[in-house]
Image: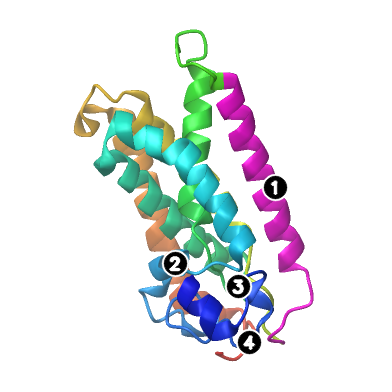
Amino acid sequence: FIYYGIQLDRLVLQVSSPSFLKSPLPYHPQLRAQAWRYFSYIFMHTGIEHLSLNMAMQLLVGVPLEMVHGALRIGLVYVCGALAGSLAVSVTDMTAPVVGSSGGVYALVSAHLANVVMNWSGMKCQFKMFRMAMALVCMSVEFGRAVWLRFYPPAFPPCPNPSFVAHLGGVAVGLTLGVVVLQNYEQRLQEQSLFWIFFCVYTLFVLCAVFWNIFAYSLLDVRIPPAP
């Protein structure tokens, strides 16, 4: 982030720079054959405001979750959310690029909040109401910022600003696969039938999205903006 801040000569709303997308990291529909972009987009953010909100949620929710559930389970939910985010953009917002770690972050936060609600009476965590409220506020502010930015006049027309659909992809993963992964942390994942059901559904979604990216753009004659 600091590197691109210096290179673009701005920290706030870096996305307003015409050179913002000229990087090997963001997902861009014209460059969707470069498979690493479906993951690497999480390392780019639209500005310090975007990065700060995602970091706040990761520190508020992600770190405590990792201390309880371990890096492997949390990493699984995070990576699945990040991949689902970029694939969801490629399927539903086909002309838009995407940047930011919101897909992975929203998967973790939504899974955690769902588990808190389902196990509210049995949880003895202090300040659980405060932590839940703060997470919801951060999620709402960040999603509102992303929706506003998507429809704001772009700095690199005809390509629109980055999509907000990755947030929704992350939430979908968090409320399905994430809930199962975090709910029974004393039981091995391979022993949970519900985990395998959601994992198979997730794998099917990924395969369908891959075929969609290969064939749908030409079949639907989508006008993709030129590569940056």
Q: Earlier in the sequence, mark 1 or mark 3?
A: 3
Q: Colour scheme used in the picture?
A: rainbow
| Rendering quarter of residue 191 | top left
Note whether residue 173 is visible: no
- Magenta run includes residue 152: yes
Please tell me whether mark 4 or mark 2 is closer to you in this view. Answer: 2
Q: CA distance from mark 4 to mark 2?
A: 22 Å
Please tell me whether mark 4 or mark 1 is closer to you in this view. Answer: 1
- Badge 1 vs badge 3, beta-carbon distance below 8 Å: no
Q: Which residue is mark 2?
A: 43
- Badge 4 vs badge 2, beta-carbon distance below 8 Å: no
Vertical position of residue 162 compared to residue 18: above or below: above
Q: Nearer the viewer, residue 5 or 116?
A: 5
Find numbered disc 1 in the image and state the secondary structure of the residue it sits on. Answer: helix
Name which residue type carries label 4.
Answer: Pro
Q: CA distance from mark 1 to mark 3?
A: 24 Å
Q: Which residue is mark 3?
A: 94
Q: Which residue is mark 4?
A: 225
Q: CA distance from mark 3 to mark 4?
A: 10 Å
Find numbered disc 4 in the image and state the secondary structure of the residue it sits on. Answer: loop
Q: Which residue is mark 1?
A: 141
- Badge 2 vs badge 3, beta-carbon distance below 8 Å: no
Q: CA distance from mark 2 to mark 1?
A: 20 Å
